[in-house]
Each structure stands twice: as C-alpha cells, then as structure tokens.
Amino acid sequence: MISRTLRHGDSGDDVKLVQEFLKNHGYYTGPIDGKFGPGQGFLNSVKAFQKDHELAVDGVIGPATRARIIELMVAPKPADDTATMEYWKDMYSLQAGVVKELQAEVERVKNLAKEIIGKGV
C-alpha cells in the first residue's frame, strides 16, 4: 500500500508497487527494485504520469498523485486477458501491502500493550 509521500531517494515496497504500476501502464521501463533513484528514470516516469493526469508535475508521489494511482489500481480494467492479469497483479500487490501494514500495526499494539500491562498479551 502506498501510505507515505515518496520522493527521489526513497526506497521500499511502496516504491516497488508504484514502479510496477507505472511499468504496467507504460510509463516506466526500468528495473522493479523498490528504489526511487539514484537515476532519473523513475522520477521522469512519475512526472510523465502526473502530466498525463493533470497533476502537479513535481516528481513527488504525494497525496494527489497517490490517490490517482490507487484510483486507477482499483478501477475496472478491459476484459482482454493481458489487462485482466495486470489488474489482478496490481490488486494482489495493493492487498499484500495493506495486509503487511495491518500486521505491523498489530505487532505495534501488542508491544505497546506489553509495556503498559507489563506481561505477555
């Protein structure tokens, strides 16, 4: 899931998810490595996406760009086999990110509870 603002120099699974999304939509041709740089290829693909979708062309995946990407990830896709496969890949990645975030939050709450009560939960 993309839940933070992403900028040149950032890395992580959320960057990888956007790389996959932009690659599937013809904007990005580089490696899916979860790194926003050091080169300009991914940055330029983000700017091209922003321009095509009438967003601020700043190369930053902030709230507006993130919302548009998520909107397109969950939008119905054409019925041809390739588009359907890409749609389900996008959906799986999106859902996997949400599950991972929820698992991390459960662990955080459990650890907090242990600190507060002073015993295992």
Image (tube, helix red, strand yellow):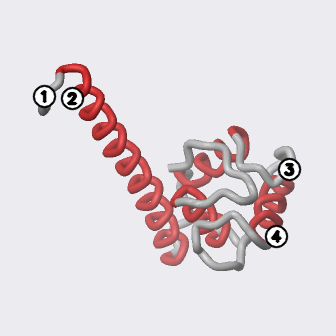
Tell which circle, 3 or 4, labels the residue nearer the N-terminal end.
4
In the rendered structure, find residue 119 and report the number of the disc placed on it: 1
Q: Which residue position holds label 3?
A: 58
**CB within 8 Å, label 4 to label 1:** no
**CB within 8 Å, label 3 to label 1:** no
Q: Amino acid at mark 3?
A: Asp
User: Which-is-in-front pick, marks 3 and 4?
Assistant: 4
**Element at label 3:** loop
In the picture, residue 113 is in which quadrant? top left
Q: Position of residue 14 (x, y in %)?
A: 55, 56
Label 4 Cα crowd, 10 Å radius (few <14 / some 14-19 / many 20+): few
> How far apart are the two marked residues, 4 and 1, measured between alpha carbons?
50 Å
Q: Amino acid at mark 4?
A: Gln
Between residue 111 and residue 96, name the one nearer to us.
Answer: 111
Q: How many marks?
A: 4
Q: Which residue position holds label 2?
A: 114
Tell which circle, 1 or 2, labels the residue nearer the N-terminal end.
2
Q: Position of residue 20 (x, y in %)?
A: 58, 68
Q: Which residue is found at the position 29% from the left and 40% from the top?
A: 107
Q: Position of residue 32 (x, y in %)?
A: 59, 74
**CB within 8 Å, label 1 to label 2:** yes
Q: Specify the farthest residue to the left.
A: 120
**Element at label 4:** loop
Tell which circle, 3 or 1, labels the residue nearer the N-terminal end.
3
> How far apart are the two marked residues, 1 and 2, measured between alpha carbons?
5 Å
